[in-house]
Image (spheres, helix red, strand yellow):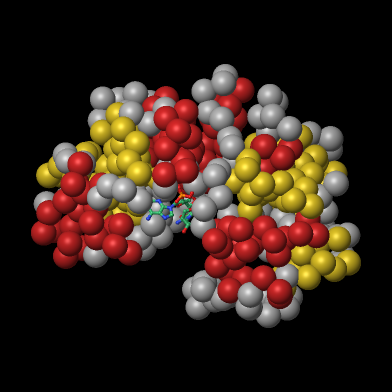
Amino acid sequence: MRAIRIHQYGGPEVLTVEEVPQPEPGAGQVLVRVCAAGVNPADWKIRAGYFKDFMPLQLPAILGFDFSGEIEAVGPGVTKFKKGEQVYGSAMGTYAEYVAAKIAEIAPKPSSLDHVHSASIPVAAQTAWQALFDAGGLTAGKKVLIHGASGGVGSFAVQLAKAKGVYVIATGSGRNQEYLKQLGVDKPIDYEKTKFEDVVRDVDVVFDTQGGETQQRSWQTLEKGGVLVSIVQPPPETEAAKYGVKGVFLGRQPNAEQLVEIAKLVDAGRLKTTVEVVLPLAEARRAHELSQAGHVRGKIVLTCG
Ligand SMILES: NC(=O)c1ccc[n+]([C@@H]2O[C@H](COP(=O)([O-])OP(=O)(O)OC[C@H]3O[C@@H](n4cnc5c(N)ncnc54)[C@H](OP(=O)(O)O)[C@@H]3O)[C@@H](O)[C@H]2O)c1
């Protein structure tokens, strides 16, 4: 099969198109014919070697986590899925024509979407869900500040929070202010013009998708007892204590039940996905350059067909 592999860590140039053996589905796995693979910032961070100390790759390795496709074969003991089913989810090595995926990490894809749009959802939407509700404990009537709301995770976070009845304040660049309103943001903030900490107070949850000074400047916007949830940088306990709030780092956990709930929201028209860039698998380098530049609206997806 055709796949995008790396033989060493490095820049986008280490991504190469190669013919490699098709994987075999093991126990608890299915073999999926990948129709589309979503691109996440984690993909280029892994390629660049940022995670090599705690998540070393066995090189050469196929990159990519998100996929949507069709089940080609089931592994030993698998009865929940059968050949021909259309599924989406996450697995290791989705920049390929086929991937072996654990059944605990997949679900039937949203029936109202094509594979390109379905492939854009799993990692980003699950991360947003887990940050807002599992780590942040958001419920109806509460108030959240979402940073990077026009990005992959942020776009889902805004809509999931609104669907729960949460008041949403969100940051994005000038180009994306209208987009933030379309997503449902109650109070959009153009970070190029306004310091968010000057205009935001007493939120229950800050969702930090940026880290660095954005995280540092966010503490003061929280109400006492509030929570800062970061998906990029562990919030220092000393800072949280100073403001009488909690800081939590969230690493997404694959969760098939959440994928089922997310697909239901999509099919009910309550959760939309924005795919700004679609490229053929062979252009994975270009996809990484765009992801790394950090200003794509919504998602980038690679097509395998
Ligand atoms: N821990 C986990 O499990 C986990 C899971 C998923 C993602 N992540 C991480 O979370 C981060 C976001 O992921 P993503 O997929 O949403 O990335 P993305 O799609 O690249 O989105 C990033 C967004 O950040 C916005 N942005 C840039 N500078 C900003 C600033 N100063 N203030 C506010 N927004 C700003 C950009 O919007 P504009 O163009 O409007 O500036 C862009 O849309 C990445 O670092 C990723 O690696 C972690």
Q: Is residue 200 above or below residue 185?
A: below
Q: Residue 99 appears in which quarter of the rendering?
A: bottom right
Q: At which x and y percent is residue 55? A: 54, 71
Q: At which x and y percent is residue 131? A: 39, 45
Identify which residue, 265 or 305, lies in the foreground.
305
Q: Is residue 207 left or right of residue 303?
A: left
Q: Can residue 108 be seen in this view?
A: no
Q: How many marks?
A: 0
Identify which residue, 31 or 276, lies in the foreground.
276
Q: Can residue 24 be seen in this view?
A: yes
Q: At which x and y percent is residue 49? A: 56, 76
Q: Residue 106 appears in which quarter of the rendering?
A: top right
Q: Quadrant of the N terminus?
A: bottom right
Q: Is residue 36 above or below residue 233?
A: above
Q: Residue 68 appears in which quarter of the rendering?
A: top right
Q: At which x and y percent is residue 108? A: 68, 33
* Residue at (73% x, 78% y) in the render: 7
* Residue at (52% x, 23% y) in the render: 270
Q: In this view, does 270 lie to the left or right of 130?
A: right
* Residue at (72% x, 40% y) in the render: 116
